Amino acid sequence: MLWKDKYLLGVPQIDAQHKELFRRVDSFMQTLRAPGDWRQKVPKLNETLEFMKTYVVEHFRDEEEYQKSIGYPGFDAHKQIHSGMVEYVLEVSQKYESSNFDETLMQQFGGKLLAWLINHVAAEDMRIADYAVKKGVGAND
């Protein structure tokens, strides 16, 4: 599993969503890297892609609501990063479907998704947690 406890923000709902995202991305990457016929992998990859299209929107909404609730000063910039990722996921999904499930496109997507998730949670989201600690606001405030 790609998840590490150092990614915990201290906000139970957000942490649970992050763990689920890491679990799904890990499963997605394992499917991509597994030996075997590409066509046999497509249904599992499609399932994960559909999940990501809805779950990231839901997660980002919840994370942004938390940021607003604590008065996080980097909210606007963080929201832009989220919007960019949602656009990317939707764009790749559309290209993937219209390309008749192109393997190369999914390999590229998987790599970018994995790197983005780790970097985003480990860097951008940690700034939210650091701000909350400095301001003395926590998940239960």
Image (cartoon, rainbow, N blue to C red):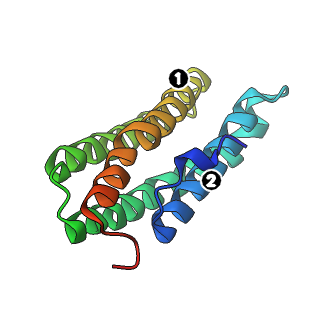
Please give left or right for residue 75 compared with residue 14 in the image. Answer: left
The quadrant in which residue 53 appears is bottom left
Residue picked out by circle 1: 108
Across and down, in percent, residue 85 comes to: 34, 41
Residue picked out by circle 2: 47
Residue at 34% across / 47% down in the picture? 86
Q: Quadrant of the C terminus?
A: bottom left
- Judged from this view, the residue extending furthest toward the right is 36
Q: Amino acid at mark 2?
A: Glu
Q: Amino acid at mark 1?
A: Gln
Q: Is residue 52 visible?
A: yes
Residue at 64% across / 44% down in the picture? 4
Residue 138's place in the image compared with 124, above or below, is: below
Q: Are marks 2 and 1 in contact (CB under 8 Å)?
A: no
What secondary structure is found at the residue carrying circle 1?
Answer: helix
Residue 59's place in the image compared with 101, above or below, is: below
Please give left or right for residue 125 compared with residue 73 in the image. Answer: right
